[in-house]
Amino acid sequence: MNDALALPVGTTLDRFIQRKQEDFPFATGELSQLLRDIVLAAKIVARDISRFDQDTVGHMNTENVQGEQQQKLDVIANIRFIRALRNGGEVCTIVSEEEEELIHTGNQHAKYIVAMDPVDGSSNIDVNIPVGTIFAIYRRLSEANGDGTLEDCLQQGTRQVAAGYILYGASTMLVYSTGNGVNGFTYETSLGEFFLSHPDIKTPKMGKQYSCNEANVSSFPLGVQNYLAFCKSEKYSSRYIGSLVADFHRNLVKGGIYFYPGSTKNPGGKLRLLYECNPLAFLAEQAGGQATDGVERILDKQPTALHERCPLVIGSADMVEKVKKYMTL
Ligand code: P6P
């Protein structure tokens, strides 16, 4: 049962985290502290984004491990989250989209691993389009007496203990789950606090909008092309911001489907399994939705590399199921 039902809208995030911890008699407070560390970094990144000045806007003339041009904000946010997690003491090792190798924090007795995309869609910052941070939290498998291992970081999505995102939009929102439902919190900048604004989010089983980059349609798998034609025949609306967290959040709340399938340019899809597909799939399922690679459940996939890509179909359960039918005709 989602205990957000016991807490009214307007409850502070800190009170909510505390209550969640109290509901677990054996909770020792480390996960609560980890969430607070993420929130601290999120508040700082939200301030950086709102400044919109020469320190945060534009690119670095560098490339990340993905060969993508790094935006200044990518680098700044990566530093902010790594620093908050290192100083918080609850995380031993971090996987970041901005780092080729594992980041060991030195907290060798810490029991948690974090996989994160510090700012997804950062190229949208310059034109004031919402962007987001995505994070997944795992309990390490190895003994808590050293750095986290590669095996600790390549766990299936079903083993996430928590996942969430921060959406830096018209307002800044934190949406997360620890496996007992999904709750959304809106940031009140004047108070420096997140407040419960969207308790117990449930995504509608059916929606009337789809999100994909139709420029790639000719290279989509035939089943996806046929599903897209179905959407048009049903007169669904196309809604595609080109910023995953913003598209995902709209579909989560209103119902809809986002898909970034494999294509000739990106046969394995564009999105990353560890720190984009898995955390959003965890949230989608916690809210009653679904997430697949077109056919297979995302959370069941066994990762084999830190930055591996994966096709993604995610959102309202009936819509994701429909894609599966077209893919297996
Ligand atoms: P395309 C941003 O780079 C991102 O990772 C997601 O946020 C977004 O949904 C997708 O890529 C956009 O990709 O190929 O449509 O520009």
Image (cartoon, rainbow, N blue to C red):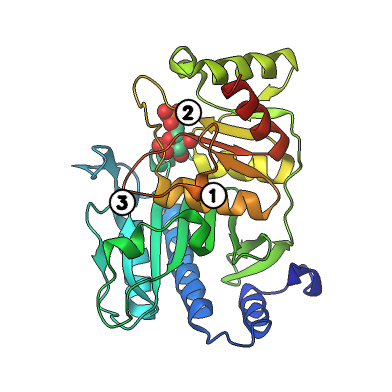
> Residue type at mark 2?
Pro
Residue that label 1 marks: 280
Residue at 33% over, 81% down: 144
Determine whether the beta carbon of the residue marked 3 sits less than 8 angstroms from the nearest atom of ligand 1. no
Q: Quadrant of residue 319?
A: top right
Residue at the left extreme? 62
Question: At which x and y percent is residue 59?
Answer: 27, 41
Residue at the front extreme? 329
Q: Is residue 84 above or below residue 100?
A: below
Q: Give the number of the disc on residue 228.
A: none
Number of marks drawn: 3
**Circle 2: is it few (<14), some (14-19), or many (20+) Cα within 10 Å?**
many
Question: At which x and y percent is residue 228?
Answer: 61, 18
Tag 1 secondary structure: helix
Residue at 69% over, 39% down: 317
**Circle 3: is it few (<14), some (14-19), or many (20+) Cα within 10 Å?**
many
Give the left or right position of residue 8, taking residue 280 as reference: right
Residue that label 2 marks: 261
Tag 3 secondary structure: loop
Whether residue 130 is visible here, answered yes or no, is no
In space, the residues marked 1 and 3 are separated at their CA atoms by 17 Å
Question: At which x and y percent is residue 185?
Answer: 65, 63
Q: Is residue 152 above or below residue 304?
A: below
